[in-house]
Amino acid sequence: MTLTVVGSINIDHVIRLAQFPRPGETLTGSDYQIVPGGKGANQAVAAVRAGARTRFIACVGDDALASTLVEGFATDGMNTEAIESIRGVNTGVALIQVNSEGENTIALAAGANGRLTPEQLQRHSAGLACKQLLLQLEIPLDTNIAAATQAKAQGAKVVLNPAPAQALPDAFLSLVDMITPNETEAERLTGMAVNNDLGAAQAAAALHAKGIATVIITLGARGVWLSERGKAGQLIPGFKVNAIDTTAAGDTFNGALLAALQQGQPLMTAVRFAQAAAALSVTRTGAQTSIPYHAEIQALLDAN
């Protein structure tokens, strides 16, 4: 059975700057690029490049670049039958600034992503009979809840990357088997600052209390905090690399993690595989342009 990703597709406009501008300030940047992005698309691409059988349920607009995006997904080997073009709207857009430290700021316009409603989802409900369902928060929340409810009822493992950060109802979180927030997202969901291992453990415990069996809090260069309900949590250090662009790090981690789990890897092994994928992605620019393939990921693991 496959991994089904339900989520967003964006066209990313990326510009590099020495530092982020302050309010009212104009800075001259460099290396402007238009590249495919969107958290859903990034994670689906990361999964399929890492070897997962992947189906993607999403929407694009009727603009000139939409068909090129979908063709690119198909070239990677993704099942794109459930990606629909919505007339009269544009594909989602992300305006991304990347500073000299590799950090980024992102402004989004939902476009066709906002048209991925529960009603639209039902047109592709057969895709929710899957082994794993991967969700993010760049599409309407009601759609995520509908997808999780239906997939869970059919035996799927529901994985949520709760990004961009927002408050979520406990009824939704109770459907989630695995959650993968970063520090900011974990704090938004639990009210607990994740500044150290104790904070990560407390936030994980709060998420377990909401019914989530596995909590993986990504901590940037420090690594990830892995917590399984009923077991002591632990910090898993990351790989040391020269980061130049972190735009797709979290998405690459999520897609690669699901690929490794689909291939039957133990959770700890899958996390290390995902960390290696994310580490490679931050050494490159852009979103999907930075996402590595399985052989590259395995080579980094073998070298460490």
Image: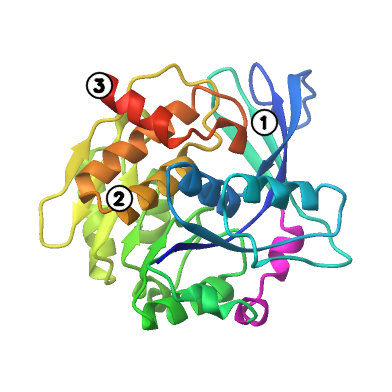
Amino acid at circle 2 = Ile
Decide: marks 1, 2 in contact (CB < 8 A)? no
Residue 3, placed above or below residue 198: below
Q: Quadrant of the rendered structure where residue 223 is?
A: top left
Question: How many numbered callouts?
Answer: 3
297 vs 271, left or right, is right
Please state the horizontal and vertical placement of residue 52, each as a whole percent of the image.
Answer: 43, 51
Mark 1 residue element: strand
Q: Residue at x 21, y 44 (%)?
A: 268
The first of marks 3 and 2 along the sequence is: 2
Residue 304 - label: 3
Q: How crowded is mark 3: few (under 14 residues within 10 Å), some or many (20 or more)?
A: few
In the image, residue 234 lies in the stretch drawn in magenta: no
Q: Which of 162 and 154 is in front in this view?
A: 154
Q: Quadrant of the rendered structure where residue 256 is?
A: top left
Residue 216 - label: 2
Estimate the spatial distance between the alpha carbons at disc 1 and disc 2, rounded to whole Å.
27 Å
Amino acid at circle 1 = Gln
Mark 3 residue element: loop
**To which residue does mark 1 refer?**
97
Q: Quadrant of the rendered structure where residue 215 is?
A: bottom left
Disc number lying in front (1 or 3): 3
Q: How is the image coloured?
A: rainbow
Estimate the spatial distance between the alpha carbons at disc 3 and disc 2, rounded to whole Å.
22 Å
Q: Which of 120 and 164 is in front in this view?
A: 120
